[in-house]
Amino acid sequence: MQGKDIQTYNFNYSHDGDSYEVAFSVDAENIQSSCTCGYSSPSHLCTHRYYILAGRTSRLLPDQMASQIKLLKRLAMSPGGRELTRYAKSRFKDRETCRRCNSSRIIDTRKSMFGGLIRLFLNKNRRYFCLNCRWSW
């Protein structure tokens, strides 16, 4: 990646005891990224990179949120960056994580038959149920 105005953004993504180093290098025309998870695909990024590009913050350190905002503003200046963030947001659309243990093993009690069975034993205003910690909200 060659250019005058290269910005590098580094993040620590932590989830369920695992921690990954995610880095983005952005200039006017190119976007490069890397992650320590080892996922490689010529057409897609890993979930950790999409998570950061989607603007999600619960698995990042609090002091990295400002850096994430700067990255997203920088990507919004180019058509390729806008397309990438739009795709990342669509990957995480309507995905809920547990508010207690941050797990993604969530059941929407209003959308599945098993969820309807669970809802019989919960308060009526509880919509989500976590399969890991058995908490509902």
Image: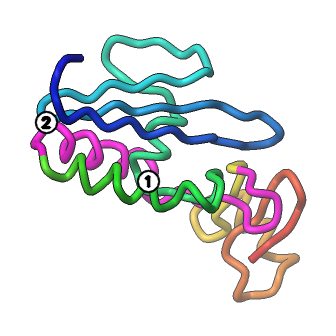
Q: Of label 1 and label 2, which has the lower sequence position?
A: 2
Q: Residues within 10 Å of mark 1 (few under 14, many from 20)?
A: many
The residue sitting at 88% across, 62% down in the picture is 134
Q: Name the residue under label 1.
A: 68
The amino acid sitting under disc 1 is Gln
Compute the Cα span from label 1 to label 2. 17 Å
Residue 38 bears which disc, if any?
none
* Foreground pick, 29 / 91: 29
The residue sitting at 73% across, 68% down in the picture is 99
Is residue 6 rendered to the left or right of residue 47?
left
Secondary structure found at label 1: helix
Secondary structure found at label 2: loop
Q: Mark 2 points at which residue?
A: 28
The residue sitting at 40% across, 51% down in the picture is 54
Q: From the image, which quarter does the C terminus lie in?
A: bottom right
| Range drawn in magenta | 78-103
Q: How is this picture coloured? A: rainbow
Task: Check if mark 1's residue and mark 2's residue have beta carbons within 8 Å.
Answer: no
Is residue 123 rendered to the left or right of residue 77?
right
